[in-house]
Amino acid sequence: MSLHTLTIHQLREKLRRGEVSSREATQAVIDRIAAIDSKLKAYLWLNTDDALAQADAIDRAGIAKNGKLLGGIPVAIKDVINVEGQPCTCGSKILKGHTSVYDATAIKRLREAGAVLLGRTNMDEFAMGSSTENSSWGVTRNPWDLERIPGGSSGGSAAAVTADEAIAALGSDTGGSIRQPAALTGCVGLKTTYGRVSRYGLVAFASSLDQIGPFTKTVADGALMLRAIAGHDASDSTSVPQPVPDYTAALDRGVKGLRVGMPKEYFIEGMDREVEAAVRTAIKRLNELGAEVVEISLPHADYAVAVYYLVATAEASANLARFDGVRYGLRVPGEDVIDMYGKTRGAGFGEEVKRRIILGTYALSAGYYDAYYLRAQKVRTLIRRDFEQAFAKCDVVVAPTTPTPAFKIGEKMDDPLQMYLSDIFTIGANLAGICGVSIPCGFTSQPKLPIGMQILGKPFDEETILRVAHAYEQGTEWHRQKPAL
Amino acid sequence: MPDMDISYIAHLARVELSEAERSKFAAQLKDILAYVAKLNELDVSNVEPTAHATPLTNVFRKDEVRPSIEIEKVLKNAPEQARDLFIVPKIVE
């Protein structure tokens, strides 16, 4: 029996019935990682003894049988979320050898729900990138085509779940870093509403945009993971004190009577024809299932990338000031403390991180603040209003997650602007603070690569996007197809 | 649009850049700034800026003494430490 291929729900049932132990399930996933991760390089760190010890403790306490949400389920964690006692490098050599000294709130909640915290997954350095090529520790490969990128920045978590190297995983989404890799690898990726999941213990990139969310094999699994990690946290003043619903309970309500908005700005010239066709067919399917499809407009969609690369870099330039060689991470000695800062950061940060720090510092600097940063924040207001007005006409917005399938490793590395434009459809949701889920909706033909559709919803309306995603998934087989590895 | 003074900005950001990085970034950032200039197409004179997307304002908590992370843990990853302190190069003569 191949336990590593199971969903959370399937494994949970077996654990509950006592057919398997958490140790057996965890061992099966570890064996899978040992067999294939040399090809994918989804993991940066895995401690077999530690994972099995966690599983044994859960088996002894009977957590898998007592109804805990994730009792005994092995879960992988993006290398940007602190797990006490495990390394946390954010994909950066500036944090080489760093060990977390506390649990992020999302991790604390996973532990309380009984999850086994397997190991650390690869990512673009400090979550800056769309391909996982910006990791200091090497690129992760797409399970469907090893010559291609898995998307980013949470490429390791996406590849791990798709390739059955984890039952589920956590990632973070600042401009699409969960939805985009989920789309490009063919799994389910949920970007939660800003404020839904505590950011305490998530190493900050752009604080007004970052959110933690799950990667799973099915929509129902995503609902379960969200229920485990969501909710107010006194340690994060931006987490919202709003009750956490039972996301699983809403899944089976169907889409009859729901209005699905199709934004004309998300079906554009230059996008891949097979991607466009697959998403249009999927929307037709939602219509057949009883949803009403309405055309909507997001008039400022075309400005989202420009706003994002000013707002996100400005916030990053401030957040990454903490990596200065004083309290943790690399230190390169200098003549004085200022010289030490410059040398440490010059040697420790990779190229994309430095480029963004420079851009963000420029956008905030005297004489340019109004022209760049303040103007970007104002256009952000217009983008947010676009979504508010759209949601007056529809319950969810449905669009392609990405304009193209996974691109080749190296293809966009010398052209940062082209790399940024690959996030064109995902960034708007972060700027507006709304929720979104990407689900598989087809494959390209030659080569065979996954296509993702994103379903965006109102703030704190994860129930409705998951319900629509689940209704679509029930009638399809895309999510059951597995890459040959 | 004025060209960015990369050396000055790098100094503000406390990031030492090599000569090669400076010239590479200068060209790339010029492209990126030309792209973001499209924001000038919009009239935003009557638009309020959005700093964040939460519905919350002024989140306060009681000013109470609570335990924080233990000193040994705080210092665990320090590049240099002594007597429960982070050691840095001399700052004041």
Image (cartoon, coloured by chain):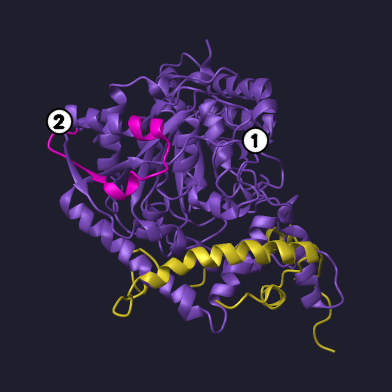
Chain colours: A purple, B yellow
Q: Which residue is mark 2?
A: A290
Q: Chain of mark 1?
A: A
Please, is residue A419 above or below residue A2 in the view?
A: below
Q: Answer left or right for A380 relative to A407.
A: left
Instruction: Find out whether residue A192 is within the magenta segment.
Output: no
Which amino acid, by three-letter code, is at mark 2?
Gly
Residue A63 image point, x, y percent: 46, 30
Quadrant in which residue B45 is drawn: bottom left
- Please provide the residue range marked out in magenta: A255-278
Whether the magenta-drawn stretch holds residue A265 is answered as yes
The amino acid type found where label 1 is placed reads: Tyr
Give the residue number, with chain letter if any, for mark 1. A43
Image quadrant holding the C terminus of chain A, namely top right
Residue A478 figure quarter: top left
Foreground of the two, A141 or A222: A141
Residue A202 position within the rendered picture, expressed as x and y whole percent measured from the top left: 54, 54
Find residue A288 and name its label.
Answer: none
How packed mark 1 is, by other alpha carbons closer than 10 Å (few <14, some 14-19, many 20 or more), is many
Can residue A101 be seen in the rendering of this structure? yes
Residue A249 image position (x, y, % from top left):
25, 34
Q: Is residue B61 visible?
A: no
Residue shown at 65% from the left, 50% from the top: A414
Give the alpha-carbon distance from disc 2 to disc 1, as whole Å.
41 Å
Q: Quadrant of residue A225?
A: top left
Subunit that carries the residue with mark 2: A
| Residue at the bottom extreme of this rendering | B93
Label 2: how many residues lie within 10 Å, few (<14), some (14-19) or many (20+)?
some
Q: Is residue B15 above or below residue A129?
A: below
